[in-house]
Amino acid sequence: DAGVIQSPRHEVTEMGQEVTLRCKPISGHNSLFWYRQTMMRGLELLIYFNNNVPIDDSGMPEDRFSAKMPNASFSTLKIQPSEPRDSAVYFCASSLAGTTNTGELFFGEGSRLTVL
Amino acid sequence: GDSVTQMEGPVTLSEEAFLTINCTYTATGYPSLFWYVQYPGEGLQLLLKATKADDKGSNKGFEATYRKETTSFHLEKGSVQVSDSAVYFCALRAQAGTALIFGKGTTLSVSS
């Protein structure tokens, strides 16, 4: 079975450019999470969706960041305009949410973003 | 709010040494607890989990016991291998349907 698929794996862009990161969760999973990983701050939750609905976006740094989940099999994280401090590895993860399971998260391989 | 604190690394060990990585948490209620591992260039993978007090999670020779009285979930392995070199993350989930909260990660380096 395919795992969580993220694209692009690597992105190098210049400050001010728009960046779009994409994620395809595992089929059948109904929760999707975006995390950001940096050396200084570790893994930070940016936003998560249950059944395509954003539940908690309190981790989104500022208005330059936006995330959408138009259907159960696709999500995007957009940064516009990008800044050097946005350089990080962005992970998407999915899980099957429910009260009868612990909701293990399955992670993609990440998108490494470098903003020059 | 809920949080996870784990020992800072890096942890450097020789092959076959005993490993402990400390993890404590702050949460209301009865969270589920997890250890994830991240190998270089990869995403995180679940290593083990425990869902209630006194549960012991185990996998690949690693184990951790959910201790509610000390709010801890320390990771242990009796004999580490070079292939165990990775970053280890402790995490909690406060309740079903919510996101995992991760510690900052502990880098383990094992030399032969």
Image (cartoon, grey):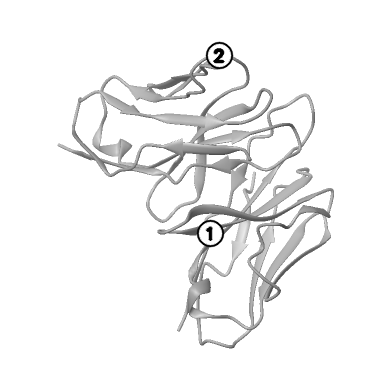
Seen in the image, is A33 located left or right of residue B71?
Answer: right
Closer-to-camera residue (B37/A115): A115
Dividing the image into 4 quarters, which one contains the N terminus of chain B? top right
Image-quadrant location for residue A52? bottom right
Give x and y (percent) for residue A47.
70, 56
Q: Residues within 10 Å of mark 1 (few under 14, many from 20)?
A: many
Kindly identify the residue that appears in the image at 64 percent across and 27 percent down. B31
Closer-to-camera residue (B72/B61): B72
Up-down: is B76 above or below A52? above
Q: Residues within 10 Å of mark 2 (few under 14, many from 20)?
A: some
Q: Secondary structure at mark 2?
A: loop
Q: Which mark identifies residue B55?
A: 2
Give x and y (percent) for residue A3.
62, 48
Pointer 1: what residue? A110
Up-down: is B92 above or below A109? above
Kindly identify the residue that appears in the image at 48 percent across and 72 percent down. A87
Dividing the image into 4 quarters, which one contains the C terminus of chain B? top left
**Inter-mark Cα distance, 1 to 2:** 31 Å
Kindly identify the residue that appears in the image at 69 percent across and 24 percent down. B29
For badge 1, the amino acid type reads Gly
Seen in the image, is A31 located left or right of residue B70?
Answer: right
Comparing marks 1 and 2, which lies closer to the viewer? 2
